[in-house]
Amino acid sequence: MPQAVIFDYGVGNLLSLKTALEKAGLNSTIGTSAKDLAKADAIALPGVGSFTAASSKLGAVKETLQNKIKDGTPLLGICLGLQLFFEKSEEGPGNGLAFFKGKNVQLPKTVKVPHMGWNTLNFVQQNELFEGVAEGTYVYFVHSLYPVPKDKSIVCTTTEYGTTFTSAIASKNIYGTQFHPEKSGDIGLKILKNFVKTVVR
Amino acid sequence: MPLAKRVVPCLDVDHGKVVKGINFLQLKHAGDPVEMAKRYSDEGADELVFLDITASSENRDILRGVVEGVAKAISIPFTVGGGIRNVADARLVLCSGADKVAVNTAAVEHPKVITELADVFGRQCVVNAIDAKRNRKPSDGKIMVETGEGKVWFEVNTYGGRKPTGIDAIAWALQAEQLGAGEFLVTSMDKDGTEDGYDIELTRAISERVNVPVIASGGAGIPKHLLDVFTEGKADAALAASIFHYNKYPVPVVKDYLRKAGVNIRP
């Protein structure tokens, strides 16, 4: 079974993601160092923690991550993990990984924040990550910020909540979801299985 | 707004067993929280809440086992409440796989615990549970709400509803939001156990004033009660226990009813 490494920024609950990845067919371990990441067949940046704290933890492994991506290792960023693909965040100071140009901004004040619960995916373009996932499918969100990519060609899905925001991106072997596939029931598991397919290929 | 309203079954857990409503059909071990969580999840529940009612410290390991078991069995979010007094208590359940913790008495007695939890885990992890009871006696500085039975204010009770505090529930919610609460679980003590419908006025009074989601709780007996609390009560989520436990109205029946009534519900 291929080996996924979930990068731990040092805050709490990674068990759900670990369990979900294992159900999807990836043996998963928690990693904190460049050494841990170097041996991974797939890497996941999870969705718990703050932008500032996580970005400081990622600083030490950024080069390793870049090399792994260049070598074709699939990378999945979930929620905060996706937001870290960009340069900056209104959540707080610190530099993201800057894999893509753009920043993360606050959801509008006209709606209740955090955006918490099940909301729908509207496809901008199809991607292997969403094979078998229908337009309008409900997935689970819990977040207060969302990414605004400069390059719109990476946007896979958008979602409506006070505004139309980017809810998933893909670019080669980099995938990111603003929602939590590990908390999105069977459909979330399907998305993770699609991710796993890109790993074993 | 495409964000769906959430239907949230609640399970009371004592020493690792579900204690209320163990009348599930076709379960090997009636009262096993993991098995019941799995069933609700399979039936389409949007989220689950576990309230640990065991008031003892030796319970920690049992609770951890339950939370881990549930986290492995289901892939929808769940909240754990009951006896969470500080960051260490919260860490135990969050690191065992829970998505959110609910704080009640500890937050009323030491409001800064809300801020501490939000700083460590993020505010989306912090549910402030409020047990509120109608009080008809006009009192200085209380927020009086017009209801079907005249003007009342809502009083916060702690220790599982045993201790009236004199604190105004609406004012407390506004303060807790400022301190970092990411969601409210508002239980009406007047309605809890009646199966007579939610306290619509209480739910709306809080939901309209705060800018974080509100879960209504207490009083659900038929699917129409959930419809009323979503439409008139402006609730973002509705929690219920007995309506589901006794298989009177299984989750799919309730969700189907709500969808047909025009509520945005996840299939």
Image (spheres, coloured by chain):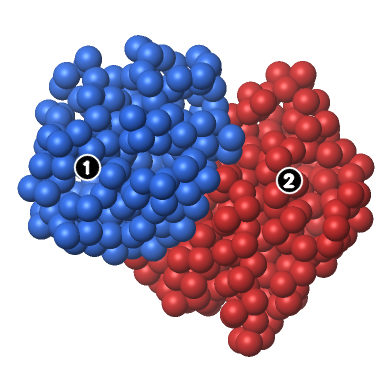
Chain colours: A blue, B red
Q: Is residue A196 above or below residue A35?
A: above
Q: Is residue B239 above or below residue B58?
A: above
Q: Could you say which quadrant of the image residue B146 lies in?
A: top right
Left or right of A166 on screen, residue B242: right
Q: Residue furthest top?
A: A125
Tag on residue A84?
1
- Name which residue lies at 49% across and 72% down: B92
Q: Nearer the viewer, residue A197 or A132?
A: A197
Left or right of A1 on screen, residue A188: right
Q: Is residue B106 above or below residue B122?
A: below
Q: Residues within 10 Å of mark 1 (few under 14, many from 20)?
A: many
Q: Could you say which quadrant of the image residue B168 lies in?
A: bottom right
SS at mark 1 in the image: loop
State if disc 2 and disc 1 touch (CB < 8 Å): no
Residue B96 appearing in the image: yes
Q: Which residue is under mark 2?
A: B40
Left or right of B102 on screen, residue A127: left
Whether labels 1 and 2 share one chain: no
SS at mark 2 in the image: helix
Point out residue B36 in the picture as x, y percentages from the top left corner.
76, 54
Q: Residues within 10 Å of mark 2 (few under 14, many from 20)?
A: many
Tag on residue B266?
none
Point out residue B141 in the picture as x, y percentages from the top left corner.
56, 61
Hey, what amino acid is under mark 2? Tyr
- Name which residue lies at 69% across and 36% down: B44
Point out residue A119 in the picture as x, y percentages from the top left corner.
51, 28
Mark pair 1, 2: CA separation: 34 Å
Report in which chain the residue with disc 1 lies: A
Q: Is residue A83 above or below residue A149?
A: below
- Name which residue lies at 16% across and 42% down: A68
Hey, what amino acid is under mark 1? Leu
